[in-house]
Image (cartoon, coloured by chain):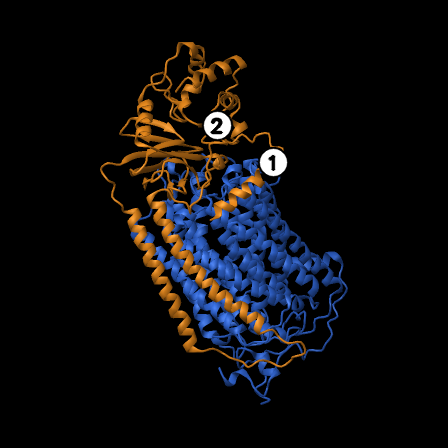
Amino acid sequence: MFTGICKELRRIFVAVGMTAAVPLSAWAEGVQPGTNMFEPASKPAGEIFGLALLVLSICAGIFIVVGGMLLYAIIRYRRKPGDTSEPPQVFGSLQIEMAWTVVPILIVVVLFLASARLIFAIQDAPQPKKSISITLVGHQFWWEVRYPKYGIVTANEIHVPVDKATYFKLLSADVVHSFWVPELAGKTDCIPNHVNTTWILPRKTGLYLGQCSQFCGAGHARMLLRVYVDTPAQFKAWIKNQQKPAVEDPAVAAGREVFMDNACMDCHEIRGTPANGRFGPDLTHLASRDTLGSGTVLNTPANLREWIKDPDHFKPGVLMPAMQLNNKQLDEVTAYLCSLR
Amino acid sequence: MADQTLPIGGVVDVTELKAPKQTFLEWLAEWFITVDHKKLGILYVVYAMVFLLIGGLEALVIRLQLAIPNNHLVSPQIYDELFTMHGTTMVFIMGMPILVGLANYIVPLQIGARDMAFPRLNAFSFWMTAFGGLLMYYSYIGGFGLYGVGTAPDFGWFAYAPLTSPAFSPGRAPDYWAVALIVMGWGSLGAGVNIITTTLTMRCKGMTLMRMPLFTWLMLVVSFLMVIAIPCLTAAQGMLMIDRYIGGHFFDTQAGGSAILWMHFFWIFGHPEVYILALPAFGLASEIIPVFSRKAIFGYPAMVAASVGIGFLSFGVWAHHMFTVGMSGPTNTFFVIASMLVGIPTGIKIFNWLATIWGGKIWFATPMLFSIAFIFQFLVGGLTGVMLAAAPWDWQLHNSYFVVAHFHYILVGAIVFMVFAAIYYWFPKVTGKMLDERLGKLHFWLFLIGFHLTFDFMHIPGILGMPRHIYTYMPSRGWGMWNMIETVGAFVQAIAVLVLVFNIIVSLRSGKEAGNDPWDAWTLEWATTSPPPAYNFAVDPVVKSRRPLWDLKHPEDPDWKYE
C-alpha cells in the first residue's frame, strides 16, 4: 500500500538528493531493494503481518467511533454568540461508566489472545531436523556469520535456501545489537553474555535488506545486513565456493605480502594463510561479497582501494584504522583482495 | 444560605501592596532566596521553557540532518550527542520541571493552602533540579583540555549497557549523564514528598479527598510514582558509577555483568516516568475541558479511580520495552496483558472528557483549542500504543520510527499541547495579564499543523523499516520524502513556539488586565487576586463541593446539593 506511493515519491526524492551536493553518495546503490514490514516474504513475518492487520483494523474502528463522536460534539455543542447561560450540569452516570469499561475489556481480551497465540507459535517453534543453523555475532559495526555445519565463516551477507527454515543463534561480541530483516522476521537482540534465537522460513527468493536496530555506537547507521534467499541449487553452489580455502594467485603475491606484513592480518582471517585475526570480518572470500563495510558501499576495486586507504571516508566511526599504505601498496593489496573469490 | 457560601480570601483583601522600590540586585536576590511556592513555580516553568528551546534546537538539527538521505550536515558523533541530549533534556530537564512547576504554583492554591508543606525543601528541590540540568549541559562546554569535559553523552537517553562502560565510552560523558540525573532525581524526590504531604495535610476546611480538583489528584498520584520510580534510576546510576570507577561488574559484560539487568533497572523507572509526564497532562485537561465546556467533569469518581489505576498498572508494564531481548513466552505474555490493561483506565478518561464536552456550550478560547487537539492526539497515541503492546507486532515495530512517532504523539501531542493549554489558562492568574488571543490562536494552528506534518508522517518510514538513532540512510530505501515532510513540520512547530515566546513578552508588557477570574472558572485559585498575594488567601477558605466558585456564583443551584 505504502510502497506504491513511496516508489513514486522516491523518484522525486532522488532528484532532491542529487541537488544536495553530497560527494559521498556512494552507498551500495543499484542492487538495493526497499524494506517494508507489510510485504512479508517469510513465515514469521507473514504471521506478524496477519496480527498487525487484526490490531490495525480494531484500532481504526475505535478511532473512527471515538474520533467521530468527538468531532460531532465539538461541532454540535459550540456556544452560540451572545449565549451566556450555563448548560445543564450532569455529574455522571454509573450505567454509562460501566458500559465504556466493559467494552474495552472485551477488546483487550481479543487482542491479548491473538497476541499470546502468536508469541508462543513463533518463540517456541521447535527447530526442524532439516533446517539450516547460523550463528550470527553482532560486532561494532558489522555482522559475523558462521555456518557451523558447513564450516563457513563470512560477514554481513547471509545466504539461505528458499522454502527451508533457517535458525539463528544470536550473539554479540561487544554491545547490544539487534537483528532485523523486516520482510523475513521481527527483531531479536544480540546481547553480550546472552544467547538468543530466532528463525525464518522464506517463501520467495531474492535479496532482503536488514539493519542493526539497537543503537550500538557511531557506526550504527551503517551496520546493514543483507539476506540472500537462494534457490537450492544456488545455495549449494555458494556453500561449495565458501568452503574452499582462499584462492592462491601468484600474480598478486605482492599484495598478499603487503597484507601479511602489515597489521591487516591481526584483525582479519584468510583461511589457508597466516592471517587469523578474529576482530574484523573474515576475508577468505571477500570478492564473492556484493558490498563492503557492512552494506555501506558496493564491492568494486575502486571502492575497496578507497576503503583500505581511509575506512572513515565511507563509514565514519568504523573501528578499522587507515593503514597509511603508499599508492603502490594500496594497488597491490587491492588486487590481492579482489582475487579472493 | 449565607453560612454555606465560602468566605474566600484574597478578594476581600483590599490593602494595596506597596513594596519598597528595589534595586536590581535586591530583586535578583529575592528570586534566589525565595521559598514562596508561586515564585518557585515560576522559576521551574521559566527554567523548563529555556530548556524547551534548547532541546527544540537540538531536534531541529536532528531533523535537518535526516531531511535528505546521505546528508553530511553533522558527524555521527555529534548526531549521537544531539539525540541523547534531546531525549534527556525533554524528559528530565524540560518535561518533569515544567509539570512540577505548574503543580507547585497551582496545587496549594487549588486546595486553599498558603504554601507547600515544606517551603524550604521546595526551594532545595528546585535548585537541585536546576543544578542538575546545568551540570548536564556543562558537559558540552570546553574541549578535552578543560578537565576532560566537552564530550556530551552519546549513547541514547536509555543508555544501554555496556555502551556506557569505560571500554565503549572513554572520557567523562556517562559520568555527567549519571551524576546530573542523580542530582535532578533528588530534586524530583523532594518535590514528590512535598506534594504528597501538601495534598494530604494542607487542604482547607471542607475539602475532602473526593472534593480535591482533579489536577491536584493527579499530582498526588504522580508524586507517589516519582517517590517510588526515581530511586530505581538513582540505584542504577549508582551501580553504573561503581562499575566505572571501582570495578564493579553489574553491567560490565566483559567481566560477566548483565546488559539485561540495566534494561530492567532503567525501564522499571522509565515506564512509570512516562506516566509521571502524562498524568499531570490528564489533570490539566480535566481542569480546562470542564471550564470551557461550561459543565462539571463527567464521572469524577471514575476519573480518580482511573488515575489511581494507571498509577498502579504503570509499575507492571516496564518489560514491554524489552519484547525483543528474548524473554520467555510466559513473561512476554504477562507484559502484553499488563500493557493492554492500561488501555482501559485511559479509555475511561477519554470517554469522560468526551461526555463532559457532550451537551456543553463550548467556548473555543486558546486553552480549549489545545485541549481538544490533546484528546484527538492522545486517542491516536493510545491506539498506536495498543499496537506496540501486541508483542509479535512489536518485534517489527520496536526501535523503528513508528515507535518514535508513537511516543512523540504522547509527549508532544498530548503533554506539550496540555502544557501550552495550561500556560494560556493560568498565565492571567500568575501575571494578572491575559495572553493575546489572536497570537494564541496563531500559535495553536501553526503548532497543530507542524505537529501533524512531523509526527503523522513519521509512522510511515517506521513501517518501511527505518530504525531510530541512525544519522543517515540510503536514498533507495524510500524514506526520504517522508523525512523531508517531517523536517518541514519541525520548523513550523519551531515558528509556533517563537509565536508563544513573542506572545508572552508582548502580553507581559501590554496585555489586557485579567481580573481575578477571567475564565469564569470554579476552583479556588480563581477566588484570589491575580497575581495572588504571598499568603494566597486573606482568610482560610471553606468549601462544600468540588466547585466552590460555582456554589458562590450559583447560590440557587449549588453543587453540594448533588454530590
Q: Which residue is mark 1?
A: B146
Identify which amino acid the numbered label 2 is placed on.
Leu
Q: Badge 2, how many Cα within 10 Å: few under 14, some, many 20+?
A: many
Identify which amino acid the numbered label 1 is placed on.
Leu
Image coords of residue B156 (percent x, y): 49, 44
Q: Which residue is mark 2?
A: A298
Q: Vertically, is A92 above or below B507? A: below
Can you name the residue that lies furthest to the left here? A129
Hue used for the chain lettered A: orange
Q: Vertically, is A155 above or below A79? A: above
Q: Vertically, is B155 above or below B553? A: above
**Quadrant housing residue B25:** bottom right
Image coords of residue A336 (percent x, y): 44, 15
Quadrant holding the C terminus of chain A: top left
Q: Residue at x 42, y 22 (%)?
A: A287
Q: Residue at x 55, y 58 (%)?
A: B413
Residue B119 seen in render: no
Q: Vertically, is B170 above or below B87? A: above
Q: Which mark is residue A151?
A: none
Using the image, name the chain to which the residue with label 2 belongs: A
Q: Residue at x 42, y 35 (%)?
A: A225
Hue used for the chain lettered B: blue
Element assignment for label 1: loop
Nearer the observer: mark 2 or 1; the answer is 2
- In three-dimensional space, the C-alpha distance between marks 2 and 1, rounded to whole angstroms, equals 42 Å
Image coords of residue B332 (percent x, y): 33, 52
Using the image, name the chain to which the residue with label 1 belongs: B
Q: Nearer the viewer, residue B335 or A52?
A: A52
Element assignment for label 2: strand
